[in-house]
Image (spheres, rainbow, N blue to C red):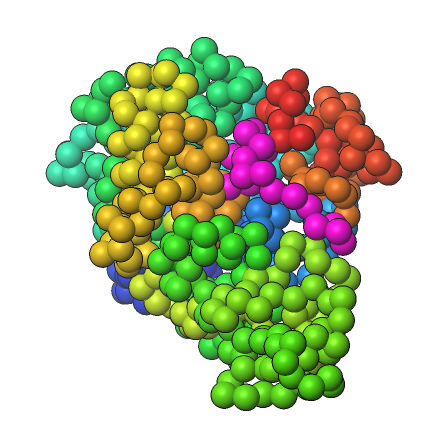
Amino acid sequence: MKLISKKIIAFSLLFCGLTFSCKDLTELNENPNGVGPESVNPNLIMPTVLTEAARTYVELGYQDIAGVVQHTQKDAWSSGHNDYDWGGDQSWNRYYDVLRNNDLLYNRAVEMKLEFHQGVALVMKSFMFGLITDLWGDAPYTNALKGELGSTADIKPVFDDQSVIYAGIIADLEKANTLLSKSKSEYSGIVDNVDVYYSGDPVKWRKMANSLLLRYYMRISAKQPDIAKAGIEKIAASADKYPIISVNTDDATMGFAGNSEGDSWPADTVIDASGSNYRRLKMCATFVEKLQALKDPRLAIWANKVQVPLVVDATLPAGTDKIVNGKRMLSPDKVGSAQIDTDPEYVGLPPSFSALPSAYNLNPTPGQTSYNPHVSFLNNIYKFAKGPLLRVRLISAAEVHFILSEAALKGWSAGSAKTHYEEAIKASFNTWTVASSYATYMAQPGVVFDNTLKQVIEQKWIASWTAATEAWFDYRRTGLPELKAGPAAKRQVLPVRFYYMRNEININKVNAEQALSKLQITSFSQADKENSPWSKQWLIQGTNKPW
């Protein structure tokens, strides 16, 4: 346990300067560098839990899961991002590290009778276990985090059924709603500056708890519709008892200090001076073309225009390939049978295009560099280590309104599907600083509400930029948007889960094998058998979704 305390201190100090000072932390205990778990102040633990949970989430939603849902593609070192070639060994250790620290936060809060901290810890426990079961399926839950007790059952915990984990998450969030229901003056021990999401505001934490309840009720809606319906109806009908995130100022977000790799926006070019991680990320053609079709102003916030557009001109002499006025002029014979995109503004990489995606669109230096002047890079804001738009968005008003719109389409008494759909898009436009374009955007064919789940989920997919995990989980349960795997992908369809890690299977063999036996092998599981990203977990078994 001493190792855990040292890690807590290390990460707390790492994020000093984000929104709080080191002085705030060191005054909480006489000797913070030597404090043990039996006496640690919960305010020393909270920054580690919040920052590590947020970093874990954004590194999924901005990296490989953004590739799965075709927000982005990579043009080099791309097989994991574009092709779902995940190597058969995806570790959940980082997730359980956060949960161990969070468990200490909760236990110390109980011992010290700090109800605010207990509520925060239950929200974060739900968030992290929600991620684990969403990504893997069955997992250690009831007997997890007890390894220090030393028994075999504690060191090698059983994997709880996925349905049990979701039920536990919902129960914990209900408890958090109660714990966080007082005014701030009624709590003790709150240190605003260590709360990097909400600055010690219990009202906003309560809204986050209830908004996560909506997320997980909708998650189980295909498998347990009666439970989901009752839960969503209860929340939608009781704003006083179940306040939720409804406006952007209540979004659960975290910014970055931008001082080191550990506290900076991922794949920036400030801390990573080589810039290679940024350069490899390109917009995906699937995403770009949808945004262009809808004349979506968010595209200009998320992407750069191509630096050198391609122009194919049949009147040019054979063999012409030259730059004229910033455009690459080509005679048809220089293009041949190559697949190209001559859009003069934005060009995305097609999903899983080939084993050499850097060659796309006649890149003059394929395979040598990620500099391709004929494909859209991400916007220059993503080069920076920090910035006003560079925030982790754990759950937002946009997501909540989309959930309620979907619920209303199901007839679950959650208000007007049209109103929530429009409010969701408005919230996203506010987030991405294009609110002035909202009315024009909403009046367009294709955006005007058509009362379909397809439209709601497609717009939610768009709004989930940098939080792509939610788009993946929605796709998995609905089959929407209708994404298609590219020709170089490892399978012909998109994956639906992560692999269980080899160490867990080897060390916790009996329990891991039991969990594996409950996964549904599909025609796409192939040689991986049960432990495949194409084997279905309980959540989508029997639903015929997403494929």
In the rendered image, residue 267, in percent from the top left (x then y), is placed at 53, 67
Task: Please tell me which residue is depicted at 59% across the width and 24% down the height of the picture.
Answer: 539
In this rendering, is residue 141 above or below 45? above
**Is 458 on the left-hand or right-hand side of 361?**
left
Task: Please tell me which residue is depicted at 45% across the width and 11% down the height of the picture.
Answer: 226
Task: Please tell me which residue is depicted at 37% across the width and 39% down the height of the picture.
Answer: 399
Quadrant housing residue 258: bottom left
In the rendered image, residue 186, in percent from the top left (x then y), is placed at 15, 34
Task: Please tell me which residue is depicted at 65% across the width and 43% down the height of the picture.
Answer: 484
**Is 498 on the left-hand or right-hand side of 5?**
right
In this rendering, is residue 420 above or below 289? above
Extreme-left residue of the structure: 185
The boundaries of the magenta stretch are: 471-489
Foreground of the two, 62 or 10: 62
Question: Where, quadrant-wise, is the C terminus in this rendering?
Answer: top right
Quadrant housing residue 353: bottom right
Foreground of the two, 227 or 374: 374
